[in-house]
Image (cartoon, rainbow, N blue to C red):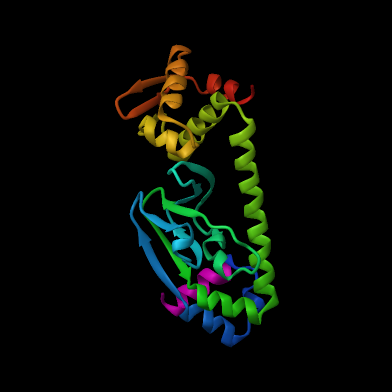
Amino acid sequence: MLADEAITLFGGTLPFWPQLDRQQKETLCTGARTVRFTAGQTLGRGERECIGVLIVTAGALRVYLTSDDGREVPLYRLAKNDVCVLSAACVLEHIDFTVSIEAESECSAAVIGAPAFARLCAENVHAELYAYKLAAERFSDVMWAMQQLLFTRFDARLANFLLEERSRTGSPELRFTHELIAKRLGTAREVVSRMLKYFESERCVSLSRGGISICDEAKLHSFCKR
């Protein structure tokens, strides 16, 4: 990416930027590149790729875990100016944790290559501290996601998912198949279909082929509180 663009972006998103010397700033700028992703494109799959540090510049990414049988556990989303260091976990000592990342929409990001980021963390304690602090914050998100998966009723999880998508897209008309929702929530398609039909019987939603219309947000919110 262009040097001026990198300086503006890093200065606004990386709190340790003022603590870097000139050479370290050059290392970051020369080690960064701009990448673009299409909706649905997967950026990384576990241990097969250490992407580097991601800074979202447009669009949105979702971060999730994948089981051996293909089931997913959603963890968190990344929006514009969010930074992801778990995509560079290979350079963080004592962190053996890998995630998958998918573009929810057309997306662009600045990627600081793993070698450049590793060199920076080795040379600058402020950068290293930031990386571990952000990783710890993300682990908190991971623990919350696991708690939801293990201890929250499925009707509440599904209602919350529908409401989050309603808020994210700005529309009550959601274009999701039952299979895709099941994948996002780490369960079977049959479980999703059964619960959606129940929601429809309660007049919370209206179902169509490949789509779900939210009819009663207040009632969905009531499921989230149970």
Number of dots carrying numbers: 0
What secondary structure predominates along the stretch shown in magenta?
A: helix
| Residue 54 higher or lower than 157, as above or below | below
Would residue 176 appear left or right of 101 to someone viewing this image? left
| Residue 209 higher or lower than 96, as above or below | above
> Residue placed at 44% from the left, 62% from the top?
48
> Residue placed at 66% from the left, 49% from the top?
140
- Relative depth, front residue between 31 and 71: 71
Task: State the quadrant of the C terminus.
Answer: top right
Would residue 125 appear left or right of 60 to someone viewing this image? right
- Residue 209 placed where, x, y %? 29, 25
- Relative depth, front residue between 204 and 177: 177
Q: Is residue 190 magenta?
A: no
Task: Determine which quarter of the picture holds residue 89.
Answer: bottom right
Which residues, given as a range, are shown in magenta? 1-12
Q: Residue furthest left?
A: 209
Whether residue 196 is visible, yes or no, is yes
- Residue 86 placed where, x, y %? 56, 60
> Residue placed at 47% from the left, 21% from the top?
195
